[in-house]
Amino acid sequence: MEETKKFIGKKILYLITQTKWGGAQKYVLELAEYFSKNNEVHIAYGEVSKTNQQFLDTCHKLNIKTIPIKYLIRNIDMSNEFLATKEIAKLLNKGNYNIVHLNSSKAGAVGSLASMFYNFNPLNVKARIIYTAHGYVFNEPLNKFVRKAYILSETFSAGLQNRIIAVSDYDKQSAIANKICLPHKIVVVHNGVDSEQYNFLAKEKAQVALKLDGQYKYFGTIGSFYKAKGYNYLTEAIKIIRDEAPEFLKNNRFVFIGDGPELLAIKKYLNENNLADYIKIIKPSNEDWKFLKALDYFILPSVKEGLPYAILEAGLAKIPVISTEVGGIPEIIKNKETGYLVAPANPLSLKNIIVEVSENPETTQMVAEKNYINIKENFSLTKTIENTEKVYLGLL
């Protein structure tokens, strides 16, 4: 039997816009940990003023070199974009990397441009440029001019990239439909999780740690408070519940674990509508997944997603999942088979499904059990790594 080829003895650079914990950061760390066993791996990161020290500490424990990119920031700023491009081009010239793996839209755009200047030099090792989008920004609700600008940026960058990894078939088809690239350049590699890595706290311990009152059932969510995550629609759904189904709140409460730019707006809405008594907001950590069993139901109300780790982790915890039908989520969740799907940006639909599942706990738990099996069989970290390694090997 022919031995499977391994990617060995090379230099890899991962570039990421920020170290604030999220799906893209988890993805990068897990790939970096695996490939660092037989290769020299570096991680370059932006948003230096907001560095997540736990992310850097994890890298150092794994003997992975981290490199700050001073001018790489999440917000659009042309002067910073220019300076960040110079920084990254200089890093590429110094590093002579075989693989440069870019993650998320800003790192993808700036890193691709920097690679163009680097690869012009015939004396350099030819760097293979790989880009993982983690969900295309142009799939968010945007006005047509902003959306077109993102499409043009992604199209230009794609011309400088050797391969694009889509974390969902939805992203791949979206890229092809918007003429970002030709079909042969983009490959689907689903995000995956290793069930052995997850040691969830037992329900009672998790609820004590989060200071939750055990008399209630909890509908909860974990994530960054960005507009694309749709928390405004979830808070509106809770208001409809309070107004139209107040009996629900006798036995149920909500938990939001996270922070981000929309936090103040969320708190303002809750206070203005007298909802604060029904929702507990908890500051996040790098390992919020440990507390998943404190929840009885998991909700993801996003308007844009790639293929979210949050749903994979909730599935491993055997927590019933309610989610919007966006991005790659329907590739994980089949409605009323492995979870519950609703249309995005629709508070009334969210309200209806929340009340429905609360009234059918036995059926809902059977659905959660099916999702657990689905994730273990179809969304393993081993598959993610194997398929990514094939991409790397195919470019050398």
Image: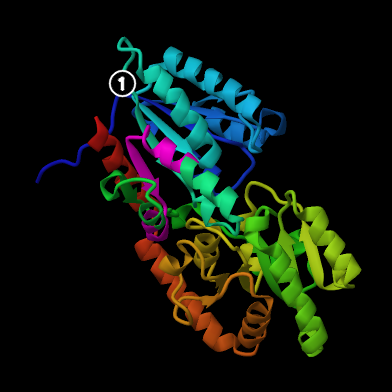
Is residue 74 something that shows in the picture? yes
For the magenta stretch, what is the residue range?
153-173
The reply, left or right, for residue 353 in relation to residue 217 is left
Q: Residue at x 51, y 30 (%)?
A: 110
Residue 319 visible in this rendered orientation of the protein: no
Q: In the rendered view of the protein, which quadrant contains the C terminus? A: top left
The image shows residue 329 at horizontal and vertical percentages of: 48, 65
Q: Residue furthest left?
A: 1
Q: Nearer the viewer, residue 299 or 170?
A: 170
Residue type marked 1:
Lys
Residue at the outermost top position: 123
Residue 285 position within the rendered picture, expressed as x and y whole percent measured from the top left: 69, 48
- Name the image quarter holding residue 371: bottom left
Tell me where residue 269 appears, x and y as whole percent.
84, 65
The correct choice, above or below, for 73 with respect to 241 in the image is above
Report the side of 18 relative to 95 (left or right): right
Q: Which corner quadrant of the image does residue 140 belong to?
A: bottom right
> SS class of the residue under badge 1?
loop
Residue under label 1? 126
Residue at image location 54% in from the left, 81% down from the top: 365
Q: What residue lies at 76% left-to-right and 86% top-to-bottom?
A: 248
